[in-house]
Image (cartoon, rainbow, N blue to C red):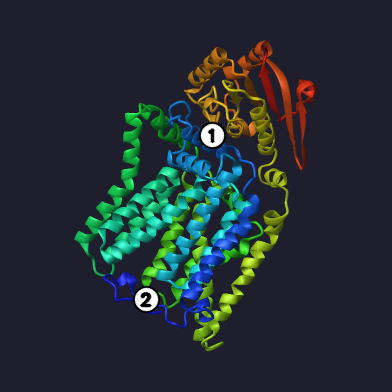
Amino acid sequence: MSKKSPKSPASVATIKQEEFDISTFLKGKTFLWFSLVLLVVFALILRSRLLDIPFERDEGGFAYMGYSLIHGTPLFTDYVDVKPPMIYILYGVFAFLFGESPAGIHSGLLLFNIGFAITFFWFLRKYYNSGIALLAALSFVLLSSSSNVFGFAAHATQLLIWPAIAGIWLSREAVVQENMKKMALAGLLLGLAFLVKQQALGFMLLAGFMVSFIALYPKPRWVYWLKSGAVLTFFAVLPYLVCLLWFWMTGALDNFWYWTYVWPSQFAATQTGNMEIFTMMYNMVSRDIEVVWYLGLAGVIAIWFSNMSVYEKVFPALLTIFGFLSLSIGFHYYPHYFVVFLPAVCLGFGLTMYTLGYWINKAGVYKNGAFGVVAVLAMIPLFMAFSPLKNYYFSEKKQNILRRVYGTNPFQESYIMGTKIQKMSKPGDSILVLGSEPQILFYAKLPSVSEHMHYYQLVDGGSQNDSLQNVLINKAEKSKPRFLVFSRVGYSWLNKNPESKLFTWINPFLQNNYNLIGVANPRPQQTAEYFWDKDASFDKMKEESLLLFERKN
């Protein structure tokens, strides 16, 4: 594979024409278009049937904030949440472009998934080769869409990695070409990724370390290193500075700062790194697809025993280290957090297969054909990973997917109840959802009395509990919304404050002002029970139920 003479040694090509490359069989542009079409079709096949799967609660909060935004409610004014603003803006854009529904939002996720796969492929194709690039991108499409990482849900981790990897690619291009415009654009993309979710910090640090390594090795360019680092840092921070300025101008800075920095910082301070939690979550994420994970992690080491340049050997190590750092921010290790680690795993998978072909070729076995043979053999572990998931992709019922992945969390039930409220509602109606089930707000399409998407902050035992609960109680008593939903689901509250005033207030408030008109009972491994109108009564509710009330006339 020929490449132009570079400005920096980082762009020197060390992979020869006998590379591990499926383009042994398909040449030039034919292989390029084959790869791009294959990635798009593969993503469509895996994700199309999952587009209309109901929201879980994180998605519900993003969707309602985004829906409210496109309908004229500025962020962090009437409603608050704990994520940076770009995730809500993206949800609003998806809803505007593709429809105000789970299918519309998940169409946006599909677009971002395809965008990442193509960008990842193009990036790796330039610095490695087409075979490595295609295997890495294909394995990412498969792993990132799997139920192991809640891949059907449009989590922030799924949406931040496209601008993040594009920023990393551009930062490398910029330092090789000494192009400050590209460096500035790289910084902006990384800064926008951070505005999707704070876990992009790991990718920002990766870009900085990569730029430093290329600028300083083997011959240090100190002045250029300082200049390029300053440009990258400034433009990476710029989107957040603009964000602060915007919220200051709109009068929402205090809300924004408290809910996206102060409270998350206080909460994170109570968490500690726990390897037992990491091990448990890793086992969940890699279950039935261990072969790709093991080959991927092995590739980060195996590539050091190949003929690649030191730059191409260092990059997978950096991607692994800082991918794990991104995964570990907050020390929660939820399955969907592992998405930020998948680029390292998937690149490593391609590198393992390349290294295998390199050593087979060097040993004289399948001379001039070893890399093509290994490229075909690489389909075996991908099929082994796909096979346990085929029912999930092609036949498993949506409600069964939600029950298998999330247990008795009432996400299918929220969709049924929320759409019922929407059909019953009239202009001027409002709603109060007590519990962290903001997806009901989105389905109901009604203004919420409460500013909160989630209620953990009201009952986490913190010093702010009493004041937040008093504000909520006062709003509810003043407005008496037509509809009130109360969630008895433990995960909807994670209550650490058994003396909460909120729970002693709610019963008399309901008895005096509301009639019970709906009961939804999630049941493990069974279809949920629903009781409506005259059939709804308190003796029908279970330990974990959604209760729907309507204001008395």
- Crowdedness near tag 2: few (<14), some (14–19) or many (≥20) residues, C-alpha within 10 Å: many
> Given the image, on which type of amino acid does mark 2 rest?
Ala
Q: From the viewer's perspective, is 222 left or right of 201?
A: left
Q: Where is residue 62 shown, x and y percent of the image? A: 52, 38
When the figure is inspected, residue 140 is found, relative to residue 435, above or below; the finding is below
* Quarter of the image that includes the C terminus: top right
**What's the residue at 69%, 25% (across, down)?**
547
**What's the residue at 47%, 23% (across, down)?**
463
Residue 538 in view (yes/no): yes
Q: From the viewer's perspective, is 247 left or right of 133?
A: left
Count up the numbered dots: 2
Q: Where is residue 73 shown, x and y percent of the image? A: 45, 29
First reached walking from the N terminus: tag 1 or tag 2: 2
The residue wearing badge 2 is 13
When the figure is inspected, residue 192 is found, relative to residue 306, above or below; the finding is above
> Given the image, on which type of amino acid does mark 1 rest?
Tyr
Q: Secondary structure at mark 2?
A: loop
The residue wearing badge 1 is 64
When the figure is inspected, residue 32 is found, relative to residue 169, above or below; the finding is below
